[in-house]
Amino acid sequence: MIFLSNRPLFYGQNSTGQNWNSGTDLGLAMTADLVDNWSGHNTVNGAGAYSSQYFCQAPGWYLARSSIPFTYTGSTQYVFAGGFSGQTAGAAFTTVRGALTLGGSTHDPLAQCCDLIRMTESGPTGGGGDFINFTAFQNTGSSITLANTATELPYVVIRWVAATSGTTPLIVPANASWPIPPAAYITSAFLNTSIRDTIRFLTYPPICKAYGASGSLPSQSFPSGSVVPLANTPVDNYSGFTTGAGGGYTAPVAGVYFVYGQFSLASSTGSTAYCAGLSVNGGSTQWGDSVNKISDTTGGGAQVGKHLRLNAGDTVQFIACQGSGSSIAWNGAGINQTRFIAVWESS
């Protein structure tokens, strides 16, 4: 229980306003730590200082999120992206980005990324253990700077959300009243349900990650949209996800869930908007991003992230919309992954 009340959490910022080269997914240093309760990060910037990495301090699944504003207000449309690379179970994995963000207006573009990443090998910063590397990308063709104002700073949040294995299925802990003798006595069954199973559930709550869309997204008029068809589930510990064209996540237990979806499409000459949203039980879509695009050669996308209070059996579907007038293929590059994430947060 002490661990559950103080799970690994990292929240860092980059306050340097540094120049950012074009065309490569580069490691993004976090130079100020707001929270690092297990000392998994080194803020010292420079070669070999590991300031762009968070090292595993306890085996588990980590929810990693980044938000990266760039100082670009030109009218020419370019692509921006955040991402994560690193090492999991002792093996390196290459950068996987968030949704491709198309920027080209009077407003600074904001690239974001969210992923559910498994780390099993713990160790000190700079050691041989697993780690998550923070990356950022822009393709303007020249160096631009990261935003650095009182209201705009790149940041990364990483938190432990579940063990790598556990006991399932379990009910949500009920916090039942303790028996009071002589009317009732504490029994092994009571202790198993109220203490053992509570710890087991909170250590290994429902989590899910699905990715990999094939085919194309048809053109539709907003607010109509299509379910994003996902094929692979590297983690779905309560067996809640259904793959395919009509698929989605069925909440195995009641509670508040963090739910996230992102998609990236192939390049398209059409002008349209890319919209990402979530639909609960087939109801009206709750939209996140709605991003305008012109003709592009890079591909673009959108994302949505919300906390949803769900009953057991409620189904959440990831919805995408574009209205170019013709279908656009899902982006087939592994780095530009389309994915869905659900994490049980609380009762």
Image (spheres, rainbow, N blue to C red):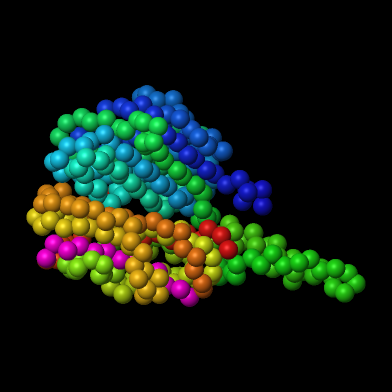
Vertical side of 104 occupied by 266: above or below: below
Q: Pick whichever, 76 or 91, lies toward us.
A: 76
Q: Nearer the viewer, residue 87 or 113?
A: 113
Return the x and y of residue 79 as percentages of the image width and height.
20, 44
Asked if the magenta segment contains residue 318, the reply would be yes
Q: Is residue 213 left or right of residue 190?
A: left
Q: Residue at x 34, y 67 (%)?
A: 285
Q: Residue furthest left?
A: 269
Q: How many marks on residues? A: 0
Furthest residue in direction front, as rendered: 106
Relative to 95, residue 333 above or below: below
Q: Position of residue 224 (x, y in %)?
A: 25, 70
Outermost residue on the right side: it is: 182
In the rendered image, the vertical position of residue 7 relative to residue 166, given as above or below: above
Residue 187 visible in image: yes
Q: Position of residue 250 (x, y in %)?
A: 44, 72
The residue nearer to you, when weighing 65 against 133, is: 65
- Judged by its main secondary structure, the magenta piece is strand
Identify which residue, 77 or 79, lies in the foreground.
77
Based on the picture, tell me whether residue 236 belongs to the magenta stretch: no
Residue at 81%, 69% in the rendered image: 179
- Would you say 296 lies left or right of 184 here? left
Q: Which residues are magenta?
A: 313-325
Can residue 317 be seen here? The reply is: no
Q: If the image is split into quadrants, where does the C terminus sit? A: bottom right
Give the percent coordinates (x, y) of residue 95.
30, 45
**Residue at screen point 17% across, 37% down:** 74
Residue at 21%, 47% in the rendered image: 102
Q: Quadrant of residue 278?
A: bottom left
